[in-house]
Amino acid sequence: MLLVVGRIGRAHGVRGEATIEVRTDSPDERFAIGSILRTDPEDKGPLKITGAKVHSGTLLLSFEGYSDRNSVEKLRNVLLLSEVNPEDSNLNANDFHISQILGCKVIDHSGKVWGEVKEVLELPSQDTLVISYQGKDFLIPFVKHFTPDIDIASKIITADNLEELM
């Protein structure tokens, strides 16, 4: 599956380095020197990484063919894409990728079906599931209190305490 793993920010310095907004749990793997990443928009890539370092907590990347500030500035806001198998990132039973949550049925402990996950909002406080319930969108905070059991293989999320949200 092709996923966004980063976004190119502003140019840094004069040698063609760009700041990167990291959107992956595996930056060392995704942004290794020699890696080739696809882009969105597609006409800006593919991009081959020729340099990578962290400066003051910010990842800086250099790309083949972009050797100065002016050239790399043309890549600002380009999304970096990589082929990722979501199941490879499941380090334990509580790890999963958003793509694995979409389409899951949400049921309560009595077996009542509340709906199907149609979107996951990545909010500052926590992720939030969007389900369609009785013709309207219904939001469920994606935390243990409301979603204690997640069975990715069966595509079922068992929910609790939904009355608190009504």
Image (cartoon, helix red, strand yellow):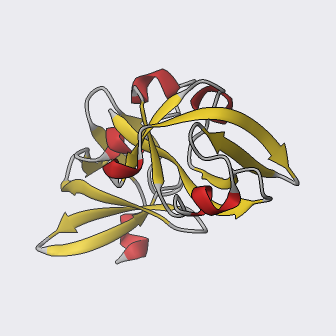
Q: Is residue 71 above or below residue 37?
A: below
Percent coordinates x, y for residue 105 in the rendering: 23, 46
Residue at left offset 71%, top offset 35%? 51
On screen, residue 60 versus residue 137, left or right, reads right
Residue at left offset 58%, top offset 36%? 64
Residue lying farthest right? 56
Percent coordinates x, y for residue 99 in the rendering: 34, 42
Percent coordinates x, y for residue 104 in the rendering: 25, 44
On screen, residue 9 versus residue 165, left or right, reads right
Q: Is residue 11 above or below residue 84?
A: below
Q: Quadrant of the N terminus?
A: top left
On screen, residue 56 versus residue 39, left or right, reads right
Q: Choose top left, top right, bottom left or bottom right for residue 56.
A: bottom right
For the image, the number of numbered tags is: 0
The front one of 67 and 87 is 67
Residue 13 seen anywhere in this rendered image of the structure: yes
The front one of 110 and 124 is 124
Residue 144 seen anywhere in this rendered image of the structure: no
Residue at left offset 60%, top offset 34%? 49
Q: Choose top left, top right, bottom left or bottom right for residue 165.
A: bottom left
Percent coordinates x, y for residue 27 in the rendering: 64, 36
Q: Quadrant of the C terminus?
A: bottom left
Residue lying farthest left? 135
The front one of 38 and 140 is 38
Q: Is residue 8 above or below residue 31?
A: below
Residue at left offset 80%, top offset 59%? 13
